[in-house]
Every structure is written in C-alpha cells, then in structure tokens.
Image (tube, rainbow, N blue to C red):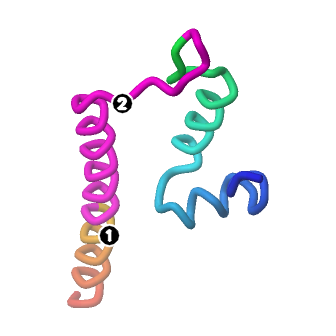
Amino acid sequence: MSLAESLGAAKAARKLGISVKTLANWIRISRDGAGFAKDGKRRPVSDVEAENARLRAENAQLRMERDFIKKAAAYFAKESK
C-alpha cells in the first residue's frame, strides 16, 4: 500500500514536504504508466529531469521561506508603531 493510500494525500504530502498538487501529479503519472517504456520497464530519469525536480523543490522551499520572512517583517513593523 502506498503512503498516500494509507495516510491520505494531504498527510502524505506534508510528511514528504511537498505540495498536495505535486503528490497528486505523481499519483496520476504512476497510474497512467508515464515514466515506463512500452515493455513495462521503468524508464530511467535523465540528469536534466532529476536536476529540474531538485530545482523545483528548492524553489518551493525558498518561496515558503520568503513568505515567512515577509509575514514576520510585517508583524514586527506593526509591533514597532
């Protein structure tokens, strides 16, 4: 049984540190058989695809950090008035 099936998509995504939409896309790709060759064997991920996935995850993390800093700055600016 997959993590998403046992915990539910939202909890599984939180546990993995990814968005629910990303997990939903992965589940859809898995069910559709994308990423597999015609003979049913898994297609290897290219270096470019792996780097792209890593950069997307890093970008998401940086956006969350930026949003947190914006909220903290607004909070402290309001406190100092």
User: Closer to the camera, 81 or 24?
Assistant: 24
Predominant secondary structure in magenta?
helix
Q: Residues within 10 Å of mark 1 (few under 14, many from 20)?
A: few
Residue pictured at 36% horizontal, 30% vertical: 45
Query: Disc 2 marks which amino acid?
Result: Val
Residue extending furthest toward the bottom? 80
The location of residue 38, given as percent across then percent down, is 57, 9
The location of residue 12, given as percent across then percent down, is 63, 59
Residue 28 shown left or right of residue 65 in the figure:
right
Q: Looking at the image, is 66 positioned above or below residue 54?
A: below
Image label count? 2
Q: Looking at the image, is 1 positioned above or below residue 50?
A: below
In three-dimensional space, the C-alpha distance between marks 1 and 2, rounded to whole angstroms, equals 33 Å
Magenta run includes residue 59: yes
Mark sitting earlier along the chain (1/2) = 2
Q: Residues within 10 Å of mark 2 (few under 14, many from 20)?
A: few
Q: Nearer the viewer, mark 1 or mark 2?
A: 2
The location of residue 37, given as percent across then percent down, is 52, 15
Secondary structure of residue under mark 1: helix
The location of residue 73, given as percent across then percent down, is 23, 75
Magenta range: 38-66
User: Closer to the camera, 77 or 21?
Assistant: 21
Residue with the mark numbered 1: 68
Residue pictured at 66% horizontal, 57% vertical: 10
Query: Disc 1 marks which amino acid?
Result: Phe
User: Closer to the camera, 32 or 67?
Assistant: 32
Secondary structure of residue under mark 2: loop
Residue with the mark numbered 2: 45
